[in-house]
Amino acid sequence: MDFPAFPEGFVWGTSTAAYQIEGAVGESGRGPSIWDTFSHTPGRTAHGDTGDVACDHFHRYRDDIGLMTDLGVAAYRFSVAWPRIQPDGKGPANVEGLDFYQRLVDELGDAGITPFLTLYHWDLPQALEDAGGWRVRDTAERFAEYAAIVHSALADRVPMWTTLNEPFCSAFIGYSEGRHAPGATEGHGALAAAHHLLLGHGLAVKAMRAQQYGDEKFGITLNMAHVTPATDDPADVAAAQRSDLLQNRVFSDPILAGRWPSGEAELWSPISDFSFRKAGDLDIVHQPLDFLGLNNYAPTYAKNAPTVDGDVTFRVATDIGVVDNPPATLGRTAMGWPVEADGLRRLLVWLRDSYPQLPPVYITENGCAYVDTVVDGKVDDPERIAYFDSHLRAVRQAIDEDVDVRGYIAWSLMDNFEWGYGYTKRFGLVYVDYQTQQRIPKSSYYWYKKLVTRRGDSNEG
Ligand code: IFM
């Protein structure tokens, strides 16, 4: 394997999320989440798939940690299901739910794997959605309360704390595009959701820091994309600015620079008066962070296009007159996403240049779906190996360009419930047979194992 060396101490890991793998939705006193409701609503997910059983990780977590031990990774990024801890989104901790994560974290400790814990990967307790969800300020306050509960129980064993995973998806795919739970298609409501997610992040960091246990680190994971205008036509250049605002700067500007992003009033004042913002909110959102988690899969090539709804007052927040138009020469994954590893390098360099206060970055997700098949008990996935290989080289190049990247956490440890796509898209290093729950490490798993156990610093074949 001819691969460039990574810095000493660079962290290698794999990632999952609670609703995508745990199953056991009715166990440990867990309450319903918006994803239970959404996935059980006809027409919302492919084949009506739900996370009811998923990878049955709730019962098989020891075996899954065994897979990671064998893989040789130093870190495991997972999320805690809020409705296991607070079944209706408020009040004291449900001890049985908390116990599951105590066992998981203890087992990881025994295996010498560092837990990277995410507090929220999209499974809002349904009771909170019924009270307005992320559209309302109270949800941000409830989130901080929940964060403090989990933190006080696990801070002695969890060094890395992430508040939210991909608030862009929660706010804009969940409340504007309607492709994710709760399936809303709104303008003002989606912008309010984005704001309350930001606020919830800031309040949660403050609450956890107020009870800091030791040297644990606090951060957030944003999904971002490097945006290029599809052509040099001024209309496409302007479209790229709108796309960059929606995908990136709505979250990164307040969190990393303590400012509301430029261009938002021009884009959204017809649909929202931003009345959800209160004095002092920006200071709450702009907490000093110990790290930024970065999720990236593909770059964006923005092309100007007509908005879907001609009547601006009815427009949803994501209807910004942009289509993604990547070069036809780029390959595509099974998600239809273009493959261009240099997009990740450009994104990292853009972050370095845009935010002087940028904390150390961990790539908390990067990976790809392809159509995987089992042949003679094996899964050969050369396209996934090529994807990881090229993206890791891009990360290495960014490090050479002085971006402080401290780790790479592949998405995903194993195939899982891919939200609206149900079980039709496979992102895992490990294949999951959903009928039998058999796990079959793919050839990419063995490739990653070789890389990880040599810490990417060997040129030996
Ligand atoms: O599966 C998701 C994950 O939950 C969040 N980031 C993107 C992944 C692939 O779509």
Image (spheres, rainbow, N blue to C red):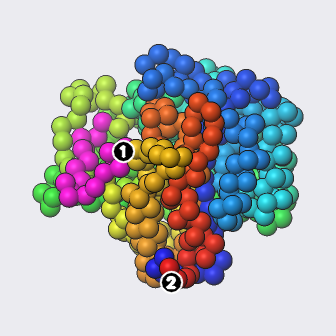
- Which mark identifies residue 459? 2
- Position of residue 288 measured from the top left corner of the image (x, y, whole percent): 64, 63
Q: Give the distance between the C-alpha atoms of the residues marked 2 and 1, in whole angstroms.
A: 31 Å
- Position of residue 45 measured from the top left corner of the image (x, y, whole percent): 46, 26
- Front-most of 64 and 239? 64
Residue 149's quadrant in the figure?
top right
Establish if 129 lies above or below 411: above
Q: Magenta stretch: residue 336 in it?
A: yes
Q: Residues within 10 Å of mark 2 (few under 14, many from 20)?
A: few
Q: Residue at x 69, y 61 (%)?
A: 70
- The residue carrying mark 1 is 334
Magenta span of residues: 319-337
Q: Residue at x 57, y 21 (%)?
A: 37
Residue 353's quadrant in the figure?
bottom left
Establish if 232 lies above or below 152: below
Which comes before the other along the chain, label 2 or label 1? 1
Is the residue indicated by label 2 positioned so its CB lies within 8 Å of ligand 1? no
